[in-house]
Image (spheres, rainbow, N blue to C red):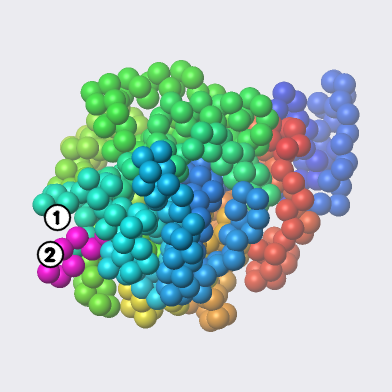
Amino acid sequence: MDAGRPLASAVAVADGRIVSVGSMESMQPWLRRYPHTVDDSFADRVVMPGFVDPHTHLRMSGTYMGLDYVGPIDSAAPTCVRAGLPNRDAVLNQLRALAAEARPGSDGRPQPVTAWGYDPATQNGHLDRDLLDQVSDVVPLWVVAYAPHIVYANTPMIELTGVDEGTDLHGLGRYADGRLNGWFVETAAVRAAFKPVAAQVYAEGFGREAIDRMGAVARGAGVTTTADMIWGIESFDTEWDEHRTAIDEGTFPLRLSMVPFEAALRRTYGTDMLAYLARKRTESDDRLRTHGIKFVNDGSYPSMTLRLGFPGYLDGEVGLTGEIPWAEVYDRMLPFWTNGIQIHSHANGDETVDMTLDVLERLLTSHPRWDHRFVVEHYCLSSPAQARRLAALGGLASVNAYFVRYRAQMHADAGFGPDRSEATARLGSLERAGAGFALHSDFNLVVTPLSPLLVAEIATTRTGADGTVLAPGERISVDRALRAITVDAAHVLRRDHEIGSIEVGKFADLTVLADDPYEVNPSQIGAIEVIGTVLGGERT
Ligand SMILES: [Zn+2]
């Protein structure tokens, strides 16, 4: 991934960093001068730079995986694989069984059923209060969608949240007649829905178990660096300390950038928020560091809550903005922008991409800044014109391209309509416009796996679920796709000077493969076996 010196047969490492890249012969000037050992255990393997997934939620999703599961695909729970449920009726039956087993809490009332993984597009439509009341109008039912942008609740659960018909809160869903429909959409409302079950969801030790479990999943996929894109959703200090302990105890074999969620940071630290980040920077090192700031400005792709421009959703839905009103986004971003902090701004729908680019242009005009690396996160539904504008403004995109394989064809007739669904993740347009981009998984908060090699395959082939090539002009080359999971992903996290390629001076982070992704048929890249990873010169 060093384009100038793309191939090598030997790497020399000292103190966790790369000393020389080339052949045993070319590095003799080093080898003659210093004692060394030769490790040829990867002699018949292909060694790539360690993969970088620049947008995951390992701790939060690992926590969800401990809840009761009602999702559509088989899912690895802490102790077993739990079977997916094909449709909404199967989910309602499962909830009925769970409600029947609900135990009384300390107050004698039945404890809430907490379930994770619902997927409205695959499982025949959203849940709502009336449907859940038919399951039980006594036991509180709390179901979070696979992408946790929406929680569904029945009447007893709504009562526990303290929300009532008169409550004015961003993201509270209502029926056409104005009655609460049991939906809590986007972070402000989801937070209200979380309060009465937080102790249950974040049971003691749970976060740490999640970190260890999901860290192992990421390592298995060849990932050596990732970014937690919603640091602070439970507790800034708890989350930081758990990752630090897991790294110190050797159970988390990754480098991690913790990206604070702006709404939580401002709520928790108010006018001290920049000082808190400055303090965390002094506690940062090459394994764990604070990086950037995260904004969320619309809903999710799989739960069909993103914001679409004309002609909108098939059935007239409108999606939802994040908890920050769009008119205030510029003012909320400004203190980070002027303090040189990199902005990562979630925009799934094309209407949100437009708003985001408007704000970026305003920031640049009022306070010019170079090498700002403003990142549009997800960039799922977009236009070629938006790619050109993003490039002109110096912005980057971190794209979820897994959806091309796992969701796009489904959403042609559910939510977004055929045109936008087919053109999900317009990587070809980004390349033609000259915009930098990375590929990410958002794992495990969308209904896709974590596999950088697989997403590189999807970006290269754009084959949908049934094998049809979707929007062929949006395909990119194998080389560009592999850059997007290594050095270009490191660029998005402002780490390309230290990771992302096998280059003198960088950390010796390697991913070892059974086959060469440049040599196999592109449709087989995702099937290449990951033999293992090396972090700072040490096998993990
Ligand atoms: Zn995310």
x, y (%) of residue 444? 51, 53
Say which amino acid is labelled 1. Answer: Glu
x, y (%) of residue 486? 58, 48
Please say if the residues under marks 1 and 2 sit with CB atoms less than 8 Å apart.
yes
Tag on residue 165? 1
**Residue in view at x 48 percent, y 64 percent:** 97
- Mark 1 falls on what kind of element? loop
Q: Nearer the viewer, residue 89 or 25?
A: 89
Residue farthest to the front, as pictured: 108
Q: Is residue 381 above or below residue 342?
A: below
Q: Residues within 10 Å of mark 2 (few under 14, many from 20)?
A: few
Q: Is residue 255 left or right of residue 102?
A: right
User: Which of pointers 1 and 2 lies earlier in the amino acid sequence?
Assistant: 1
Say which amino acid is labelled 2. Answer: Gly
The quadrant in which the C terminus is found is top right
**Residue in view at x 56 percent, y 26 percent:** 244
**Residue in view at x 43 percent, y 26 percent:** 237
Residue 499 visible to the viewer: no
Q: Is residue 483 left or right of residue 90?
A: right
In the figure, residue 124 lies in which quadrant? Answer: bottom left
Residue 335 visible to the viewer: yes
Q: Which residues are magenta?
A: 175-182
**Residue in view at x 23 percent, y 70 percent:** 317
Q: Residues within 10 Å of mark 1 (few under 14, many from 20)?
A: few
- Mark 2 falls on what kind of element? loop
Q: State the separation of the CA atoms marked 1 and 2.
A: 8 Å
Determine if the magenta segment contains residue 478.
Answer: no
Determine if the magenta segment contains residue 179.
Answer: yes
Residue position marked by numbered label 2 in the rendering: 178
